[in-house]
Amino acid sequence: MAETWIVLGASSSMARALVRRLAARGDGLILAGRDLGDLERDAADARVRGAAFAETIRFDARDLACVASILARAGACEGTVSAAVFVGSMPPQAEIDADPGLIEGVVTDSFTGPARVLQGLAPIIEARGAGTVIGVGSVAGDRGRIGNYVYGAAKAAFATYLSGLRNRLGRAGGHVLTVKPGFTDTAMTWGIEGMFLVASPDKVATDILSALEKQRNVIYTPFFWMGIMGIIRLIPERVFKKLSV
Amino acid sequence: MQWKTADYAGWGRALRAKGRIARPERVSALKDALAEGGPAIGNRRSYGDGALNDGGAATEMKRMDRLLAFAPETGVIEVEAGATIGALLKLLAPQGWMPAVMPGTGLATIGGCIANDVHGKNHHGAGSFGQHVLAVTLMTPAGPREVSPASDPALFRATMGGQGQTGAILSARLQLMAIPGQRMKVLETRMRDFDSFIAALDASKAEFAVGWIDATAKRKRLGRGILEEGTLVEGTRPGPERKPKPVPFDAPQALLSWPVVKIFNRWYGSGVPDSGRKRTRALDEFFFPLDALSGWNRLYGKRGFHQFQCVVPADRAPALKEILNTIARGGVASPLAVLKRMGPGRAGHLSFPMDGYTLAVDLPARARVPALYARLEDQVIAAGGRIYLAKDALARPESMAAMYPELEAWRAEVAKADPAGRLATDLVRRLKLRSA
Ligand SMILES: Cc1cc2nc3c(=O)[nH]c(=O)nc-3n(C[C@H](O)[C@H](O)[C@H](O)COP(=O)(O)OP(=O)(O)OC[C@H]3O[C@@H](n4cnc5c(N)ncnc54)[C@H](O)[C@@H]3O)c2cc1C
């Protein structure tokens, strides 16, 4: 029985790259996102590339009504059900400074929305004794920076959540992989100045797949971000607070 | 829609533009981007200014690359226009299909292949890319619109080879070609001079044929080179997947075109015996030899280079010999030029192919090149031939009507599809394609 993947935020380019690889190995795909018309095209792409099946379902992190239907669909799948989470939003920090009301949206998109789905999926994974959760966070969650600390805080919360979920699911035969991409060449980062060492979504997807094979818990992609963030984390707070990295 | 202000160039890097570029990943984002005006562009493998819009906006299609439907029984595929030819080949070859026409780089997008109605090493038999397009879906201000030779023959014809001027192509339905396996049996034969090259091309029965010419050889050796003839055969891919080697920096002048020289020497110098040499190659190695070195255009240094590609009618081979002679005596050409036989197949008003012979030569961007190009252009017109817009950076607008006799019919269709001229590119403006 092939594995079925629920992909939250499936129209992001990172998700698309991973979905193509999962399709090529014949997995089943349930693509969840807001733009259903466009997701249909991704589902078609997955079918042409060899997916056992590919369908779409609505997911809006800010609309709890979606969660129930996604979980119902997950429960109805035979065999192993896994999930990959690519959602999140990153309005410029200056916009958040001007309108603190944006904070809830960022936290919902990047943390609580997907966590609602994963929280409902956990019992299914436990009951079946198998299943993987891939949670895509960000290096921005490793330390709060002046440039995007609300987004960073939401991603940090999500990473902590994933760590706890790993602790829980690991006891029941499940697995959780936390992915921390550095700068990636996506629609979110297109046109943003000051990016360096930018990786392609394909590279991220390749890294995710090999981490899955090795049952890794937390990865940085590309790997050198582990070193970069290691150094950034070591900077004493009294120095860090004066930096704008 | 997010925009990036960029300084960008054609493949030859001699013509550049500054402007805003969007790179949508979804249909809705594509719609927003196009609303701001400017052409859709592909992977910028056109050498000159075909994919440039200086001072304006352009919408890069690369991320619109999904496969929408595939029927393995009939070999019909529907694909978004940003997908590359190479990606299609890689995915389809193991299933017994490939794009019926492929240009010399796998990095051209389907949209780019349509907009230049590209040709491959099988043009003499298979015709041009557009002849295998069953339908395209254009993004019009009123929404996506499917256009086929039956539904709207004039608009379809203006779109094939139409430089993107009838609208952004969202997707295309293509008839693929069935293949017996993933191998190409290649016969390489040494050619003494131009006349024997032409004779060999005429006599060749091979489905795929391409001639590599030493454009620096003169007098008795003028036109010497290697003829490569390919036949598809059964079998899985020979050898592992290629990993393109990057060119990390702009080469200094001294290094100019060394890979090209090297490739050439390997073929020509390293003794293809007079009796010929047989090899079995993977399809991508045969079709896209230069893709082994990604970004090889940087080897021409910061100033970049041009490519001159012309075609002359089948009965004007002597005129092509004179053109080659002009190039050889010009003394600036890179040593590796390409000579091919073409058939009559063409799908659009502005399609390049004609029944005859085509020659393509790289010319580093140097002070004396425009004058040389102008001489070549005159010779081409005198021979009743034409210059390939996908490669051009230097032609004169006055030459277009002579080279492209269907220009007026194309203009009329384009004026209907894009009355405000929002899709114009630098090439369209430079060559006054849309206005007399
Ligand atoms: C190494 C090399 C070898 C080549 N060999 C060959 C060959 O053998 N035969 C041949 O015919 N050509 C050849 N070419 C030329 C190349 O195939 C064409 O220039 C092709 O158009 C490049 O595709 P692209 O996606 O890069 O398009 P671009 O160069 O980005 O754009 C070309 C044109 O297509 C239009 N366009 C692109 N996408 C769309 C779209 N979605 N909707 C509407 N318009 C669009 C652009 O506006 C522009 O007018 C070669 C080029 C290289 C670099």
Image: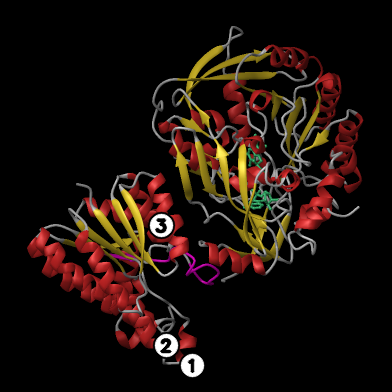
Q: Position of residue B76 (x, y in %)?
A: 51, 38
Q: Which residue is mark 1?
A: A98
Q: Which residue is mark 3?
A: A16
Residue A189 is a magenta residue: yes
Question: Does residue A90 appear anywhere in the picture?
Answer: yes
The quadrant where ligand 1 appears is top right
Eye-nearest disc, 1 or 3: 3
**Is the C terminus of chain A in the top left, top right, bottom left or bottom right quadrant?**
bottom left
Q: CA distance from mark 1 to mark 3?
A: 33 Å
> Which element carries disc 2, helix, strand or loop?
helix
Q: Which residue is mark 2?
A: A102
Kind of residue sitting beneath label 3: Arg
Q: Position of residue B84 (x, y in %)?
A: 54, 45
- Left/right of residue A93 with respect to residue B117 in the rendered view: left
Number of marks drawn: 3
Q: CA distance from mark 2 to mark 1?
A: 9 Å
Q: Chain of mark 3?
A: A
